[in-house]
Each structure stands twice: as C-alpha cells, then as structure tokens.
Image (cartoon, coloured by chain):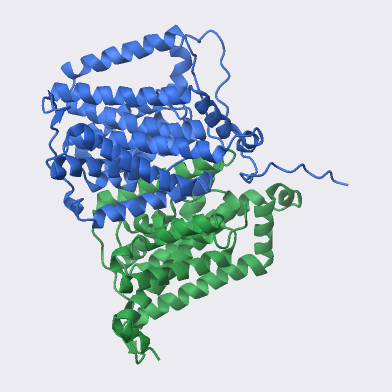
Chain colours: A blue, B green
C-alpha cells in the first residue's frame, strides 16, 4: 500500500536552509502584523498535520482517527492545569503521555490491518474515545473544560502575555517539527519509507516492520497530543470538537492540500485551511461543504498538493526536468506477511 | 421460561424492549454493511458516502411526502431509484477516474462527497430532525404476551431480513451474481470473456447506494430524518465491517444483526458502555482474528 510519496529532500542543500531560515524569521516577526491567536491556532494545527503526515506520508498508513490523540491530550492538559493545578509544562507532558499511551494501544491493534481497514479501525477507535469524552465527568460533556489558566512556564515566564504565549507556541511547534524532520532523515525513517514502498521486501530484508510501524504510530500520536495540549492552552478551552471525527478529517485534508509525504506540506495545508475557516467562520455549514469540495478536487486533480507542485521550483531545480511524482498503480492485494507467489505459467 | 431474568435485575419488559431496539439497529447495520461489502468487493473502495446516501434516502422519503404527498410505500421504491441513479453518476463522473490509483484515494474522495452532501443538508435543515409519520397500515402494536411489539418495527425487521436474504440470493445463487463474484476475483479475465465489467462496476455502486437509501427510507419513521443520521451510523457500521470481515455477504448480515443485539443487551446490563461496546468487540476481534470473523485469512 503506497501513497504518492513526493519527496524533495536534499540533505545539505543551501536552498533548504534558506527556506527554513526565512520561514522561521517570518514566524518570529508574524505576531507584529497578524493576530497572534490566529497564528497560534495555525501552528498547533500545523504540528498536528505534520504528526499525521509522519504516518501517512512516510509509512503509508492513513489514520482516520488522529483526533483521538489531539483531543484527549487537549482534555488531559486542560483538566490537569485547571483542576489539579499542576504547572503548565507538567500539564502538557501529561497530555502527551496520555496521547502516546493511547497511541500504543490503538497502534498495536490497528497495525494488524493495513490500507482501507487501517483507516476504518483507527476511525472506530477514535469514535470510542469520542463517546468516552462525551460521557466522562471530567470532560464537562457538551460544555467542555473552560477557562483553563495558562499559568507560568517553569514558574517564571508569564504565559498570559499574548506575545510570550506566541513565542512559547512557536518553540513547541519548532521542537515537534524538528523531531519529525530528524526522525524522517534517520535510519529509522529510511526503514519507514522502505515499508511504505514495499513492506514484504522490508520484511524479507530482516526488518521487524511491525515494530517500526508501531513506533512511528506512537511518535505520531504523541506529537498530535503535543499539538492538542498546546491548543488547549492557546484557547484556554478543551471541547468535543477536538476529539470529533471531523477533526480527523480536517487533518487529512490539511495534509492532502499541502502535499502528502512532503516535509513542509502539512504546514502549508494547515495555514491554508485555518485561514479559510477564519474567513468563513460566519458561514456555518459552508465550511464543511467547501472542505468537501476541496477534498474532491485534490483527489481528482491535485494529488501532489501545494508543496509537491512548487517545491521543485522553490529548490532551484527548475532547469533539471524532474520526473513527476509517480502515481502508484493499483496493485493486487498482497498479504502483508507473504511475498507474492510467482504466477503459474499457463500450459 | 424467562425466570432467570428476574434474578439478573432488569425487568422483562425493559429487557425485551432493548432487545427489540437492538434488533432494529442490527437490521440497519446489516443492510448498510451489506452494501459496503458489495461495493468493496468490486470497486475495492470503502464507500464513505454510504452514510450520506442512507441520509439521502430518508430525506428523499421526507421530500416525497411533504412536497408531493407521495407516501411511504412509493418512497420505498422511488428513493432508492433516485439515490441509486445519483450513485451511478458519482461512479461515472468521479470514482472511475481514480480507479487505477491507490484505493485510499477512493476513501478520501467519498469522504469529501459525504462532507458536501451532509453540509448542504445541514445548511438547509440544521442539525435537528424532521419527523416522518409511520404509514397508516403499520401503525399500532400487537401484544405478544411478554411485550408490546409495534407493527412498524416488526415490519422493519422482517423486511430488512428479506432484503438481506434476497441480496445474498442474487449474489450467491444467480448468474448475474456469479459474474459479479468472478469479476471480484479477476476482472481482467471476466472482461476477456466478453462481459462488460465497467458497466457492472457502475451498476454495483448504484445498487449499493440504492440499498443504503432503502435503509434510509425504512429508518425515517423510527429515527428522525436528520442531516447527521448518516455520519452517526456509518462509523459504527465500519466497526461492524471490520468485525465481520468483508469476505462474505452472509457474514456482513450475521454480524450486523448480532452486533445490534449485543448493543441492545449492553443497554440493559451496563448502559454506560452501550455506545462503545461495538468498538471494544472490534478491538478483541483484531486481537484474536485480525481478518475478521468471516473474513478470508490474509
């Protein structure tokens, strides 16, 4: 099961560093001319989408239940900080830990199936978490957890200052992003890509692909949790929307728009979608309709995503004709543990 | 005969009432997972639009009644036809173009379609439900001695069973079904025998959509006709499909009814878990038999 993996990584390339430096400079300057809460929301969603993309873009596993990790971490952090009164950084750690633990359990079960079944299984587990959050006492049901205090970071830095909070969120995002980039470019990441391209072959080379898939799932869940915990502090609010299946759909859409399997794609997609939602906030269900239309258009005509299309130009590789990212043809369903048997010659 | 029930706490009427609710839910799970399985067999995609098509069926019946004064019995035929034709259009105009890509794109495309359809109806009708009255022939209830059985609910159970068995019969016992099963196994070879597989794919998707719409019409008088009714049920149906495995038609029917019953029973004995029990069973099945109870071992 392989998704279109269009990678434009050039290790050591100056273009990459230029772009990275430019974007970070932009992010540092941004709150002076844009509404900070808006960028903070976009950054949280971007981290969420990057975490999701680690699984879809680099292992080829489409999870339709990532809201479970995002939402539960959001609830745990909100509850820990507000009701237990723990310091902010411990609240975030608690959220990430719960998301990672959920990732361990769900991942352990879900990686037993692949492809479409994997998507359905993760969706079903996420719905289970949703019902749990709907009924549990500490989540406040339909009201959610409101008025979550941001508190002081390490007891020193006042996060109630909008700018301070902004730079804190930016730091969290950059940390999560760096973890993902590091993971993708490590030997571990190479094995993940090998699994994406041809799992039976990776097995035959002696890799315990189940372990790699599970580890990637846990990492993805933990980082999605980090995004959710941060989001709870930004809005000082955790609610059922964070854990609803529509949130899982949104993160899929962000990654699809930005470019599946590209490092920056999910970030671009997250900013795109957050901006759109910002402008259409008054339009009610039109947001859902437009999201649906974007889904259809992306799948039919725009599968490389924004970054997948512009990256070759941005990296200064315009002169050299780049073969377009391959559309992988439908393959016969290959059982994950078995290598395809040779076709019997017709006699 | 049911004396032991008194020991196990819940009074008999409650027990049977929940059993009935479970059976009704099971009937809808069975019909929807049947359609999903048939579509999956030939197109290899999971039809995320299935919930929206179920909702469209219910709304179709509601429009027919409120705009044209056409009643339940005609809606039972018209709504599946309309939604089936819409399904054919979706297959011809959209799904066909991505048939050669990874199947996950099919999931994403149908998910997008579901968002569009649901969004349009939510924009128009909000999240609240519209009532749909039970047809006069099926109003009232009969006393079975141990419980009152509303006639309409009895009809839903019997009719959905009949539909399920008819679908099973068509697929497993007729020539058309044989073509269908052959095309599921090896479409290229079946085409070589001169059978128009692309047309069969189109009709299969239309048929699956029509089946969902039929379930929607039947559900209209029981649940309210609401834009959200599709997405609420479809995720549970996905879990049912994972539990049953997509390999067999009979498996889809059996697991649909059985899980509905289990859900109903959970409502009696441990109500807090009733909305999650199916997902817990799914987790157990994944642990013990990852291919699903009726699925072919992968």
Image quarter hosting the N terminus of chain B = bottom left
Q: Is residue A294 visible?
A: no
**Foreground residue, B79 or A67?**
A67
The vertical placement of B127 against A21, above or below, is below
The vertical placement of A217 against B80, above or below, is above
Q: Position of residue B85 (x, y in %)?
A: 49, 55
The vertical placement of B263 against A294, above or below, is below
The quarter holding residue B57 reads bottom left
Task: State the residue at coordinates (41%, 38%).
Answer: A218
- Tag count: 0
Task: State the residue at coordinates (53%, 31%).
Answer: A192
Name the residue furthest right.
A347
Task: State the residue at coordinates (55%, 65%).
Answer: B251
Q: Position of residue B107 (x, y in %)?
A: 48, 45
Task: State the residue at coordinates (62%, 57%).
Answer: B296
**Foreground residue, A176 or B203?**
A176
Q: Would residue B282 be found to the left or right of residue A345 on screen?
A: left
Q: Would residue B87 be found to the left or right of residue A43 on screen?
A: right
């Amino acid at each position: 099961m392989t998704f279109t993996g269009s990678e434009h990584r050039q290790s050591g390339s100056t273009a990459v560093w230029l772009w990275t430096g430019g974007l970070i400079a932009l992010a540092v300057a941004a709150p002076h001319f844009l509404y900070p809460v808006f960028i903070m929301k976009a950054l949280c969603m971007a981290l969420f989408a990057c975490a999701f993309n680690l699984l879809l873009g680099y292992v080829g596993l489409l999870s339709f239940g990532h809201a479970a990790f995002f939402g539960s971490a959001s609830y745990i952090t909100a509850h820990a900080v507000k009701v237990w009164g723990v310091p902010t950084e411990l609240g975030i750690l608690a959220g990430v830990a719960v998301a990672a633990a959920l990732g361990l359990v769900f991942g352990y079960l879900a990686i037993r199936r692949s492809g479409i079944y994997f998507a359905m299984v993760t969706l079903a587990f996420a719905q289970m978490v949703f019902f749990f959050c709907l009924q549990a006492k500490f989540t406040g049901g339909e009201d959610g957890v409101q008025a979550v205090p941001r508190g002081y970071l390490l007891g020193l830095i006042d996060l109630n200052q909008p700018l301070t909070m902004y730079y804190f969120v930016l730091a969290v995002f950059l940390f999560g992003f760096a973890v993902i980039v590091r993971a993708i470019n490590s030997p571990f990441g190479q094995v993940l890509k090998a699994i994406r391209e041809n799992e039976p072959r990776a097995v035959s080379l002696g890799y315990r692909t189940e372990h790699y898939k599970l580890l990637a799932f846990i990492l993805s869940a933990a980082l999605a949790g980090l995004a959710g915990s941060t989001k709870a502090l930004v809005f000082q609010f955790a609610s059922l929307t964070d854990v609803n299946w529509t949130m899982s759909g949104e993160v899929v859409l962000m990654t699809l728009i930005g470019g599946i399997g590209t490092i920056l794609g999910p970030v671009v997609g997250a900013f795109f979608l957050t901006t759109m939602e910002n402008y259409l906030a008054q339009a009610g269900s039109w947001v859902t309709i437009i999201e649906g239309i974007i889904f259809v258009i992306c799948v039919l005509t725009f599968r490389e995503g924004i970054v997948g299309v512009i990256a070759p130009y941005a990296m200064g590789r315009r002169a050299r004709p780049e073969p377009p990212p391959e559309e992988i043809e439908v393959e016969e369903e290959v059982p994950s543990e078995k290598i395809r048997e040779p076709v019997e010659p017709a006699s | 005969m049911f004396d032991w029930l008194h020991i196990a706490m819940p009074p008999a009427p409650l027990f049977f009432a929940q059993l009935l609710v479970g059976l009704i839910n099971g009937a809808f799970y069975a019909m929807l997972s049947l359609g999903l399985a048939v579509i999956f067999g030939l197109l290899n995609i999971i039809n995320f639009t299935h919930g929206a098509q179920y909702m469209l069926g219910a709304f179709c019946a509601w429009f027919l009644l409120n705009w044209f004064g056409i009643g339940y019995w005609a809606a039972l035929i018209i709504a599946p036809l309309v939604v089936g034709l819409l399904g054919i259009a979706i297959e011809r105009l959209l799904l066909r173009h991505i048939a050669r890509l990874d199947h996950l794109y099919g999931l994403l495309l149908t998910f997008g379609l579901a968002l569009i359809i649901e969004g349009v109806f939510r924009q128009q009708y909000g999240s609240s439900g519209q009532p749909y009255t039970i047809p006069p022939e099926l109003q009232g209830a009969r006393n079975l001695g141990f419980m009152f059985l509303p006639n309409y609910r009895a009809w839903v159970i019997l009719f959905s069973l009949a539909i399920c068995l008819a679908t099973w019969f068509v697929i497993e016992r007729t020539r058309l079904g044989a073509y269908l099963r052959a095309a599921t196994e090896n479409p290229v070879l079946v085409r070589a025998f001169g059978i128009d597989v692309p047309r069969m794919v189109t009709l299969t998707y239309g048929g699956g959509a029509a089946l969902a719409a039929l379930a929607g019409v039947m559900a209209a008088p029981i649940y309210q006709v609401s834009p959200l009714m599709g997405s609420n049920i479809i995720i549970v149906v996905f879990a049912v499909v994972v539990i049953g495995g997509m390999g067999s038609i009979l498996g889809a029917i059996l697991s649909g009814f059985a899980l509905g019953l289990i859900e109903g029973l959970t409502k009696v004995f441990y109500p807090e878990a009733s909305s999650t029990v199916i997902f817990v069973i799914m987790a157990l099945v994944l642990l013990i038999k990852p291919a699903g109870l009726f699925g072919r071992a992968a």
